[in-house]
Image (cartoon, grey):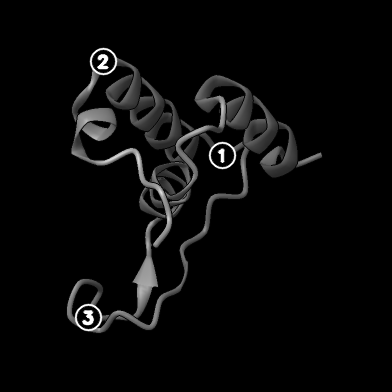
């Protein structure tokens, strides 16, 4: 069973701040933040997981990852050049 950050990270100030940043990126046309496929038809009826949800789920799966560093790398990788 994989370690997870759990609700405590997602509900923490850092977690909320990281989510806010992902949502701001979604609203900014300078980033490619399109939704991607999700097989979870119950949670995402259109089979599209929003950008912020996808990355918050990833951070939740890897609790030892530095969330701020991950955010910075995602910003670099998604920036439209």
N-term-proximal mark, 2 vs 1:
2
Query: Is residue 18 placed above or below 45 in the rendered structure?
Result: above
Q: Which mark is residue 11?
A: none
Which quadrant: the N terminus? Answer: bottom left
Where residue 58 appears, as percent x and y from the top left, is 47, 50
Q: Residue at x 71, y 37 (%)?
A: 79
Residue at 28 percent across and 24 percent down: it is: 16
Question: SS at mark 1?
Answer: loop
Q: Which residue is mark 1?
A: 29
The x, y position of residue 53, in whole percent, is 36, 51
- Few, some or many residues within 10 Å of mark 1 (<14, 14–19, 20+): few
Q: Secondary structure at mark 2?
A: helix
Q: Are marks 3 and 1 in contact (CB under 8 Å)?
A: no
Alpha carbon of mark 2 to alpha carbon of mark 1: how far?
26 Å
Where 60 sits versus 50, above or below? above
Q: For the residues marked 3 and 2, what is the alpha-carbon distance in whole angstroms? A: 29 Å
Badge 2 is on which residue? 13
Question: In this rendering, is residue 26 above or below 68?
Answer: below
Mark 2 vs 1: CB contact within 8 A: no
Front position among marks 3 and 1: 3
Q: Residue at point 82% right, 39% down?
A: 81
| Occupied quadrant, residue 22 | top left
Residue 40: x and y, percent?
Answer: 30, 79
Tag 2: Cα neighbours inside 10 Å, few (<14), some, or many (≥20)?
few
Q: Which one is in front in this view, the residue at disc 3 or the one at disc 2?
A: 2
Which residue has dot 3 on it?
45
Going by the picture, which residue comes out furthest to the right? 81
Q: What residue is shown at x 38% (from left), y 57% (from top)?
A: 50
Of circles 2 and 1, which is in front?
2
In the image, taking residue 69 as reference, residue 64 lies left or right, namely left
Q: Among all residues in the image, which is located at the extreme front?
A: 1
């Amino acid at each position: 069973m994989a370690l997870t950050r759990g609700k405590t990270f997602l509900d923490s100030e850092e977690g909320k701040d990281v989510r806010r940043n992902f949502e701001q990126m979604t609203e900014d046309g300078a980033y490619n933040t399109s939704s991607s496929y999700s097989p979870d038809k119950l949670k995402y009826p259109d089979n599209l997981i929003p950008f912020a949800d996808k990355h918050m789920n990833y951070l939740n799966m890897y609790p030892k990852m530095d969330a701020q560093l991950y955010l910075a790398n995602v910003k670099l990788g998604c920036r439209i050049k």
